[in-house]
C-alpha cells in the first residue's frame, strides 16, 4: 500500500496563494512519480479572513495541525492589517503551540544564480543554519512602564532555558552526524559571549558539554558580528551553524541574499517529534498579487525540504534538481517580473523536469 501523508496548506496573503499553487503542482508530480499519496487540507488563515471575520487562528486549527504530517505555508502579511498581528497570531502561534523548536535554513547557491559576493560560486556557498525557534527574544517577555510619556521604559527579555538550548544544540550535532547536507562534519556556535554574558554562557557551556558526545564532529565558535563578516568574506568556512532565535533570524536573511535572494530561499520550522511547517522566506509581496510574475521557486524549495523531512528523500532530490535546471537554463533572474517567465510557467518547468529527471545513474 502506498504511503499517505496529510498536509495542511495555508496559502496566506498576497502572492502566497500563487506560489503555493505552483508548489502543489510540483508536489503532486513528485507523489505520482514517487508512488506515495498526499492529501491536502487548505486553510484560509491570513489577512483577508481576519478583516472579514476578526479571527486570526483558532485553537481548534492548532489541534487539527497536530494530526497532520506537515504544514505548507505561503506567506503572511496584509497591507491593511497592522504589522505584527498576523505574524504573531499565525506564524508565532503555530511555532510555539506545536513546539517547532528548530528553524532549519539551507543556504545554497545554485549554478547559474548570481551572488553579490565577488569571486564566490556554488562551491563556496553551501551551508546550513540551525536556529533555535521558540525562545530568546521572541517569547514576548517584557513590557512598558509609563508608556507614551517622556519617562517611558520598554523592556524585552531574552528567555533561554537549559532544555531549549540543549535540544537545539543536540539537533545540530545530530544533523552534522547524519545529514548529507553536512559535508564537512563541522559545527559552529554563533553567539555573543563577550557581551551577552548570561545567555551565551549557557549556550557555550551546553555546546561544549554536548560536543563531548560527538568526538567526530569538528566544533568552533564565532561571535555573531564575526559570523556576518565571514559569511560575506569567506562563506566556504561554514558547514553548519547553530545559534539563538534573534541571531538566527538575522544571519539567515544575510544567507538568503548571498544565495541569490528571497526568490530562492526557503526553510522549515521543525518539531522532530510532531508536526513541522515549511515556508518560503520572502514575504507576501502584495504589489505583485494576481500579476503572474512572482517567483515561485522559494515556495517550491520549501516543498522540497518538506518532502525530505517526511522521508521522501529521493523525490526531494529530484525536485531540487528540477529547481536547479530551471535557474540554470530557463530564467533570466530570480526577481519578480524579471524572470522572463511567468509564475505558472516556472512551476510547469519544474514539473516537467521532475517527470523527466533520469535517476538511473
Image (cartoon, helix red, strand yellow):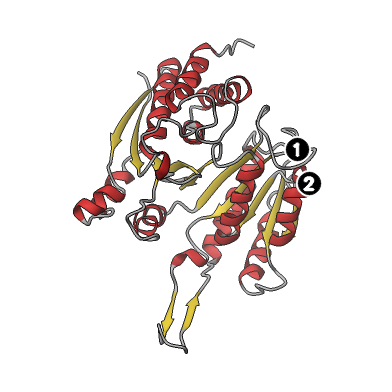
Residue 309 appears in the picture as rendered: no
**Most foreground residue, 236 or 101:** 236
Vertical relation: 151 (above or below) 352: below
Residue named by callout 2: 234
> Given the current orientation, which residue lies at the most extreme bottom position?
151
Q: Which element carries disc 1, helix, strand or loop? A: loop
The picture quadrant where one finds residue 209 is bottom right
Residue named by callout 1: 124
Residue 361 in the figure: left or right of residue 291: right
Q: Which residue is drawn at 27% across and 45% down?
A: 64
Residue 231 in the figure: left or right of residue 28: right
**Which mark, by number, is residue 294?**
none
Vertical relation: 229 (above or below) 202: above
Counting from the top left corner in percent of width and height, residue 22 is at 41, 28
Q: Residue at x 44, y 44 (%)?
A: 285
| Tag count | 2
Q: Residues within 10 Å of mark 2 (few under 14, many from 20)?
A: some
Q: Give the distance between the C-alpha atoms of the residues marked 1 and 2, in whole angstroms.
A: 8 Å
Are dots 1 and 2 in contact, CB under 8 Å? yes
Q: Which residue is drawn at 78% across and 41% down?
A: 118
Amino acid at each position: 500500500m502506498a504511503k499517505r501523508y496529510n498536509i495542511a496548506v495555508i496559502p496566506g496573503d498576497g502572492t502566497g496563494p500563487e506560489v503555493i499553487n505552483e508548489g502543489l503542482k510540483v508536489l503532486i508530480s513528485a507523489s505520482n512519480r514517487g508512488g506515495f499519496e498526499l492529501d491536502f487540507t487548505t486553510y484560509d488563515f491570513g489577512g483577508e479572513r481576519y478583516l472579514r471575520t476578526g479571527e486570526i487562528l483558532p485553537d481548534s486549527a492548532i489541534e487539527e495541525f497536530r494530526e497532520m504530517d506537515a504544514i505548507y505555508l505561503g506567506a503572511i502579511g496584509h497591507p491593511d492589517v497592522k504589522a505584527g498581528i498576523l505574524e504573531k497570531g499565525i506564524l508565532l502561534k503555530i511555532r510555539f503551540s506545536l513546539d517547532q523548536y528548530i528553524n532549519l535554513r539551507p543556504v545554497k547557491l545554485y549554478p547559474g544564480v548570481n551572488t553579490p559576493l565577488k569571486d564566490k560560486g556554488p562551491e563556496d556557498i553551501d551551508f546550513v543554519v540551525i536556529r533555535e525557534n521558540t525562545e530568546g527574544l521572541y517569547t514576548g517577555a517584557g513590557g512598558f512602564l509609563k508608556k507614551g510619556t517622556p519617562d517611558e521604559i520598554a523592556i524585552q527579555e531574552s528567555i533561554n532555558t537549559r532544555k531549549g538550548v540543549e535540544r537545539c544544540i543536540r539537533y545540530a550535532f545530530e544533523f552534522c552526524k547524519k545529514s548529507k547536507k553536512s559535508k564537512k562534519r563541522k559545527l559552529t556556535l554563533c553567539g555573543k559571549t563577550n557581551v551577552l554574558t548570561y545567555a551565551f554562557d549557557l549556550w557555550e557551556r551546553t555546546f561544549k558539554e554536548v560536543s563531548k558526545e560527538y568526538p567526530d564532529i569538528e566544533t568552533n565558535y564565532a561571535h555573531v558580528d564575526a559570523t556576518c563578516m565571514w559569511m560575506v568574506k569567506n562563506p566556504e568556512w561554514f558547514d553548519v551553524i547553530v545559534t539563538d532565535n534573534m541571531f538566527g533570524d538575522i544571519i539567515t536573511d544575510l544567507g538568503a541574499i548571498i544565495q541569490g535572494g528571497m526568490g530562492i530561499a526557503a526553510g522549515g520550522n521543525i518539531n522532530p517529534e510532531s508536526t513541522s511547517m515549511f515556508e518560503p522566506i520572502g514575504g507576501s509581496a502584495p504589489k505583485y498579487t494576481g500579476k503572474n510574475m512572482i517567483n515561485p521557486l522559494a515556495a517550491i524549495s520549501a516543498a522540497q525540504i518538506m518532502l525530505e523531512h517526511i522521508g521522501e528523500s529521493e523525490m526531494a532530490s529530484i525536485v531540487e534538481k528540477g529547481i536547479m535546471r530551471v535557474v540554470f537554463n530557463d530564467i533570466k533572474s530570480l526577481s519578480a517580473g524579471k524572470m522572463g517567465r511567468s509564475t505558472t510557467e516556472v512551476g510547469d518547468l519544474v514539473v516537467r523536469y521532475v517527470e523527466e529527471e533520469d535517476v538511473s545513474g
